[in-house]
Image (spheres, coloured by chain):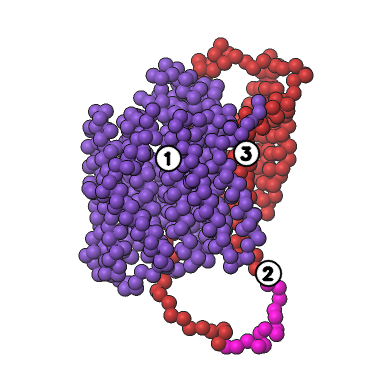
Amino acid sequence: MVEQLVFYALSGILVFAGSMVVTVRNPIHAALFLVLAFFTTAGIWLLLDAEFLAMTLVLVYVGAVMVLFLFIIMMLDINLVVLREGFSRYLPVGILIAVLLGLEIVMVLGPSQFGLDIVPAPAHHGPAYSNIEELGGVLYTVYVYPFEIAAVILLVAIVAAIALSLSGRVKKRRGQRPEEQVVVNPRERVRLVKMAAERPDSETP
Amino acid sequence: MSLMLNDFLPAAPEIFLLAMVSLILVIDVYLPERYRLVTYQLSQATLVATTVLVVLLYPVEPVLTFSDSFVLDRMGSVLKVFVLLMSYFAFFYSKEYLRARNLFKGEFYLLGLFAVLGMMVLISGHSFLTLYLGLELLSLSLYAMVALHRDSTAASEAAMKYFILASLASGILLYGISLLYGATGTLDLAELRSAIGAEGEGRNVVLMLGLVFVVVGIAFKLGAVPFHMWVPDLYQGAPTPVTLFIGTAPKLAGFAMLMRFLVDGMGGLRGDWSDMLVILAILSLAVGNIVAIAQTNLKRMLGYSTIAHMGYMFLGMIAGTTAGYAASMFYIIVYALMAMGGFGMIILLSRAGFESDRLDDFRGLNERSPWYAFLMLVLMMSMGGLPPFLGFWAKWSVLRELVAVDMVWLAVVSVVFSLIGLFYYIRIVRLMYFEKPADHSTVAAPADMRVMISTNGLAILALGLYPGALMAVCISAFAV
């Protein structure tokens, strides 16, 4: 009984936090609501006996990822007016889709499909049960292939981030070189070339 | 459990490719700028060696490994060979283009190789987890490749649109997968198949909603109407070699994704998903063929043409027979070959500062270079589906399978739309042969590029005259 109350309380906060993330005006507030959503999710996972995952969620997402997010939002000078442009214009369509999706989910995920008689409640494990051991037992054996691909995806993310942010900024040029400027020859500076006609990049789609 | 050497062997091409990408990544960092060509050559050598490995491991019976999350079967091997071949051509075509525009960086080829790895993982995926991870590996590499040209606002905009819409599609696909998992409690395709039953005995409302989300997610990724909004903008905005790469090999991976999810996993629900594909196919044929007429940019026009061709590809899936799947596979391979030629021609005719991607740039091509005008003629006629060109046989094979299962009305509808579509392909031929050129410069491309594009065009011509061999390969991929 207490467990159910805790679950409903956490779920209520989670849904509230989730909807606040997409509706509040200030991106900082949105990020903080996302932190709240992560915390409540961790609470729900604790109810399911997934202690290790719950702790990791708080440590990694709240402790590292969201803090970085907050830094980035604070560093970028985000224009809130531009960000909110068209919000009211798209709101009716958005609400319509959200309501339809919500209805579908309520119809499908109700007790007729996922009642306790069809999907039994997970059994609780004793204090001797180790989450990490269970995870470690399958992570490098049963799931070794997906695990390695996930690692490759992270590698791609690193390569892509470096390729996109470092392009053309690696030139090291510190100060002037007077001796080179004095001995320069006009023929090295101006060169007449004959070339085929060009056209500016095609118009933006 | 422990992993033995035999468990790794079926995935040897993937493992080799990953090892080589990691090696090239390190080598590229230490290479001086003037030796950048080495990265390119190593990448091409890697693709060739991986192809050899895939061919050597061509299986008779499907082999499962890594706790059934990886499957090596004939369909997968054939598709992988074509993916590697197309990537080889795509890298080849891109070399001069990137050099002339100061974009010749190691990252282009590295990300390309990662994308190839993603496609191979996707093609061989046998659980939702590996299928999804393969798809993400492919997509992430492609987003970055589109955005690599930092100075071009069009490319950045295309990358942004592609990234946001494709992420949305991934979310939808994941939600569908979670519903399927909720309904059956498994991530494995074979277990899902037995949970559903051969005739859909285990069909329930949760499975149906999951199926809808999965189909929508895949349709987004393939760019089928009404989930096509990103395709034309991406094709036009991305640098031409990237468009070429995205328009060819990943389409084969997309076909594999369709086969794995719908046929291997949810074959029992065929009656349900084929109805959804009928809607997607008709809309794609209509929008792709009609809207393409209004385009003045060739890359954008080919984008709409992709949408239409995805519609044709669905037709074979709708037929729902083994022969139908083989026809779809034949279609998608043929389409990728033609798209490669089409974008290859745009690259061939372009030069630094001049993209040659407008229809008007092809005006009077016959006077400038009769040979390339002829190759373009072959490509356009083939895409339009005129006999005896290759595209005709592709269309004919899917329509034949459709008629074989008594869906004549759908075949008639698609023929009507391909007649409409023929108009914009023929318009290019008219521009090339019956108009005066605005630009009298001769086609200046390096010899190796000329040889490759001619090979590409002649291959389409030769396969059009003798389509039996390629068709036989596709049928044998599905033979039991």
Residue bearing mark 2: A172
Among the chains pictured, the one given red colouring is A
Between residues B10 and B428, which one lies in front from this camera angle? B10
Question: Tag 2, which secondary structure?
Answer: loop
Classify mark 2: residues with Cα within 10 Å, few (<14), some (14-19) or many (20+): few
Q: Residue B334, can we see it?
A: yes
Magenta stretch, residue numbers = A173-186
Which-is-in-front pick, marks 3 and 1? Answer: 1
Which-is-in-front pick, marks 2 and 1? Answer: 1
Are the two marked residues, 2 and 3, in contact with CB atoms closer than 8 angstroms? no
Residue bearing mark 3: A148
Residue bearing mark 1: B78
> Is A66 on the left-hand or right-hand side of A84?
right
- How far across and how far down the image is residue B57, in percent? 49, 38
Q: Amino acid at mark 2?
A: Lys
Q: Quadrant of residue A52?
A: top right
> Is A150 on the left-hand or right-hand side of B45?
right
Name the chain under label 3.
A
Question: Tag 1, which secondary structure?
Answer: helix
Q: Share a chain, discs 3 and 1?
A: no
Q: Is residue A181 in the magenta section?
A: yes
Q: Amino acid at mark 3?
A: Glu
Structural distance between the alpha carbons of marks 2 and 1: 48 Å
Q: Amino acid at mark 1?
A: Val
Q: Residue B318, can we see it?
A: no
Name the chain under label 2.
A
